[in-house]
Image (cartoon, helix red, strand yellow):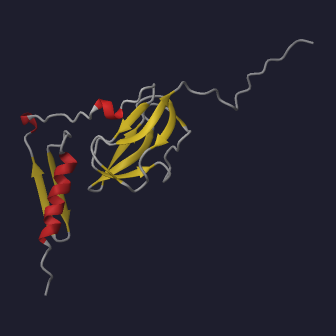
Amino acid sequence: MAEAPNPHQAVDAVDEALAAIRGSSIAELEVEWEDGHLRLHRDPSAGTIPFEPASETITPADDRIVVISEHVGVFHGGAGGPFPRPGAWVEAGTQLGVIETLGIRNPVVAAVDGRVEDVLVDDGAAVEYGQPIATLRPEARPPDPTADDTTEHDA
């Protein structure tokens, strides 16, 4: 005899799915698992109120840039995996980590060229919309240490 599905699992799945699409441009989401199925659809023409985090809580007083989460999920990066660690220089668009939501891996990228000053979230930690993920200090590309820029002088 098959075990009856846990009604809490369905409620949790709906909550996670709604959190995943809230504030995004996703109009339809379908998820299947062994004991269930969930399909969400919303009218994208109805519009959404974009998420705007409180600027005073994430704007540093200096030139640092705070990278914030655009998703709810589990963060993978920082000290884990192949992602830049604090102190590393990165180009704009460099992937700093990913936020996994319902099996979808959403990249977290650097908005500017600079140095990773700090990763504020541990690898494997849950993150929320608007949560600060990392801080970057804008900086020009450092000189290539392998470049031979010495000049020969006539003797």
Place residue 42 in its image quadrant: top left
Near-viewer residue (37 or 141)? 141
- Residue 131's spot in the image, x, y percent? 32, 43
* Residue displayed at 29% across by 56% down: 103
150 on left or right of 50: right
How many marks the image carries: the answer is 0
* Residue displayed at 12% across by 70% down: 7
Image quadrant containing the N terminus: bottom left
- Residue 149's spot in the image, x, y percent? 73, 22
* Residue displayed at 93% across by 12% down: 155
* Residue displayed at 49% across by 53% down: 81
**In the figure, 16 relative to 148: above or below?**
below
Near-viewer residue (44 or 54)? 54
**In the figure, 35 relative to 2: above or below?**
above
**In the figure, 75 relative to 96: above or below?**
below
- Residue 38's spot in the image, x, y percent? 13, 59
Q: Which residue is outermost to the top?
A: 154
150 on left or right of 112: right
Q: Which residue is outermost to the right?
A: 155
Near-viewer residue (57 or 7)? 57
115 on left or right of 28: right
- Residue 86's spot in the image, x, y percent? 53, 42
